[in-house]
Image: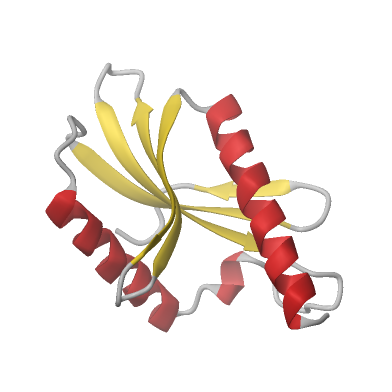
């Protein structure tokens, strides 16, 4: 798979992931591809929980190409996890919204189905 094909797969997967999250959760999209010197977070939402509280949700999106032997969740190594945490911390310095809690989720696309893994690394 070429670099251009990987980027296209990534962009399409992020768009589909945002759509999935908005459909499955009571959430509002705050940001796509939030970038800092520390890294990038694919999607950031505020989700209305069943308790009535808002939670800030950072979502890492992974898509497995047919030629990739590694599944989405396994591709987020400790180095990438630390970059996600650092980027989330940077976002929090500017966030002035009403959310009282936060989590970091993973949405992985295997070409047929989404795997949703909430609250992984924070």
Q: How is the image coloured?
A: secondary structure
Camera-side residue: 94 or 109? 94
Query: Residue at horizontal 14%, vertical 39%?
Result: 96
Q: Where residue 100 appears, x then y in whole percent? A: 17, 35
Q: Where residue 19 appears, x then y in whole percent? A: 62, 35
Q: Where residue 49 appears, x then y in whole percent? A: 34, 24
Side of 8 relative to 120 (left or right) = right
How many numbered circles are shown? Answer: 0
Q: Where residue 37 appears, x then y in whole percent? A: 30, 77
Quadrant housing the C terminus:
bottom left
Side of 64 relative to 89 (left or right) = right
Please, is residue 98 above or below residue 57 in the view? Answer: above
Query: Residue at horizontal 61%, vertical 52%?
Result: 14
Camera-side residue: 69 or 33? 33
Please, is residue 1 above or below residue 101 in the view? Answer: below
Query: Residue at horizontal 62%, vertical 62%?
Result: 62
Kindly give the residue lying farthest to the front in the view shown.
4
Side of 60 relative to 36 (left or right) = right
């Amino acid at each position: 798979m070429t670099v251009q094909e990987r980027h296209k797969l990534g962009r399409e997967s992020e768009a589909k992931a945002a759509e999935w999250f908005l459909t499955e959760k009571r959430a509002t999209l705050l940001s796509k591809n939030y970038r800092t010197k520390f890294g990038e977070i694919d999607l950031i939402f505020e989700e209305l929980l069943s308790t009535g509280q808002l939670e800030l949700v950072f979502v890492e999106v992974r898509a497995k190409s047919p030629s990739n032997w590694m599944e989405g969740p396994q591709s987020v190594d400790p180095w990438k996890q630390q970059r996600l945490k650092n980027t989330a911390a940077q976002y929090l310095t500017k966030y002035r919204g009403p959310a009282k809690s936060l989590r970091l989720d993973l949405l992985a696309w295997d070409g047929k189905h989404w795997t949703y893994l909430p609250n992984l690394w924070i």
